[in-house]
Amino acid sequence: MIERTVEELTPIVGSRPACRALGASPATIYRRRRPPEPRAPKPRPTPARALSQAEREAVLGLLRCERFVDCSPAQVYATLLDEGRYLASTRTMYRLLEAKHGGVRERRDQLTHPGYAKPELLAERPNELWSWDVERHEALSNRAVVKGHRLRSVAAGR
């Protein structure tokens, strides 16, 4: 809405005075008049330490072999390390499996906690809801009450 008003005032007073009068940024107005041309994303360079295609196929072949077909990448990684072989990290194995087969996830069902609803107390008649002073109760049982940041002793009622 401010942009339209600036555009209406521009032929009369100019762009900068119109922006100043309406509290709009001139840079925003100029950017909206001539938006920058969209750029094609740059291709990402391949890291120097990336696995070659042959190494990737070797890792995938090992993960799919009969010996490791029912094992997780973490188990395969540990077994290969015990044998003195290192092909790729656990994360790389998961990444290769995901690229080849789509969604790879943990096989175990993970526990999800339900949302906690804060309890609400509703009294519709007098004497329907009773409560107690927790601070006083603690003072009587602990003989100390924290008020603000100071700890002071409290004489308990007899």
Image (spheres, helix red, strand yellow):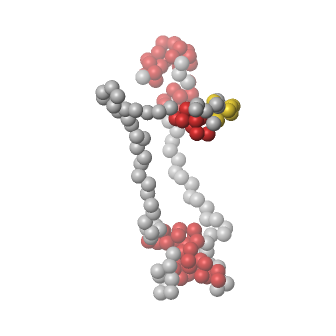
At which x and y percent is residue 130?
A: 40, 32
**Considering only vertical position in the picture, is 75 above or below 127?**
below
Left or right, residue 61 beside residue 143: left
Left or right, residue 107 beside residue 153: left
Q: Splitting the image into 4 quarters, where does residue 110 fall?
A: bottom left
Q: Which of 157/110 is in front?
A: 157
| Residue name at image x 43 percent, y 66 percent | 109
At which x and y percent is residue 142?
A: 61, 39
User: Quarter holding the N terminus?
Assistant: top left
Q: Which of 102/81 is in front?
A: 81
| Residue name at image x 35 percent, y 28 percent | 127
Q: Splitting the image into 4 quarters, where does residue 101 fall?
A: bottom left
**Considering only vertical position in the picture, is 1 above or below 78?**
above
Q: Is residue 14 visible?
A: no
| Residue name at image x 33 percent, y 26 percent | 126
| Residue name at image x 47 percent, y 68 percent | 106
At which x and y percent is residue 121?
A: 38, 35
